[in-house]
Image: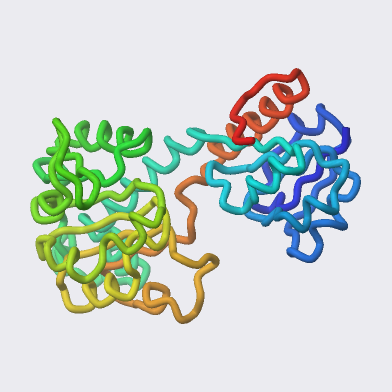
Amino acid sequence: MNITVLDTATLANTSLDALAQLGKLTCYDLTAQEQVVERCQDADIVISNKVVIDQHAMSKLPNLKLICVAATGTNNIDLIAAKEHSIAVTNVAGYSTPSVVQHTFTLITNLLGNTHRYINDCQQGLWQQSPMFCRLDYSFKEIAGKTLAIIGYGSLGKAVADVARAFGANVIISERKGHAPREGRVSFNDALTTADIISVHCPLTDETRNQIAATELSMMKPTAIIINTARGGIINEADLADALANNVIAGAGVDVLSKEPAEQSNPLAQYKGANLLLTPHIAWASQESIVRLVNEIALNIQAFNQGEMRNRLV
């Protein structure tokens, strides 16, 4: 069995022994679109994180039996074409929950405590110049007692809610925008106006694209912060940059952008204010998370070989 990995670099040098035991393994750090057919010509199984495998590629790969997506989202795979060509497709879900939750709170605690600003001051030698034992140049706020709103209450949202409660936060769950709140939830607008911290964990769909823009940001408390470790495009990036620059809200922590890698022209990539923490889509990528991902892919392949429907999308 020939197994080809198209973008091994996304796995951060994690051991692929679990995959190598299943067949002849060929790995490429990164693969350009025009290289897909050539590199997959002899493959029975192709593993891709973000490389697009479309109708054209599938039509040129008669040996291809299984595509393993090294992620949860499958927008890079033409699922309709895969079904037409009788190519199975699997993904992996849930592997990155602890990692995403940890990074979410890294952003929250840094913003509330202005930790990044204090670290920078220490690196610049300002503590040595302090007239007293500490520096109190910037505010330091606690999560305890704050109202934290979750937008997107799947497994990630629920895990963030659990940790927030452990910090002593009052957790509220937002209903979908434009929908009447179900029991145990508050309306989308009430979540915006009430929360001190908003954490976004919903998928990017036609319904959620730009669901938080200038109007919604203006509804938030001027002391509130918003965190997005879900998908770029849910929060309008130009409107968020304006809101931060004009102190409409107190801060934002963003790990995802609408186009990745970040474009030089992206308003958040250009923004230099200390009330924005921008990280390069790393929330999912703890070492432990990637090990779980590789192991789950191996289990998906084993299940496929045994005729089992494990994590199958096609």
Residue ranking furthest to the front: 84
135 up-or-down from 89: above or below: below
Residue 300 image-quadrant placement: top right
Residue 202 or 10: which is nearer the viewer?
202
Quadrant of residue 220 within the rendered picture = bottom left
Q: Nearer the viewer, residue 65 or 50?
A: 65
Above or below, 212 relative to 75: below
From the viewer's side, name the closer residue of 284 and 42.
42
Residue drawn at (43%, 36%), measured in percent from left and top?
97
On the image, the x and y values in percent for residue 103 come to 39, 47
Horizontal relation, residue 298 to residue 43: left or right: left
| Residue 287: % across, % down | 56, 40
For the C terminus, the image quarter is top right
Quadrant of residue 159 within the rendered picture: top left
Residue 52 shows in this picture:
yes
Residue 26 against residue 114 in the figure, above or below: above
Instruction: Return the residue found at the far right.
Output: 42
Q: How is the image coloured?
A: rainbow
Residue 12 appears in the picture as rendered: no
User: What percent of the width, then of the height, locates residue 228?
Assistant: 34, 55
Residue 268, position as x, y percentages in the image: 37, 73
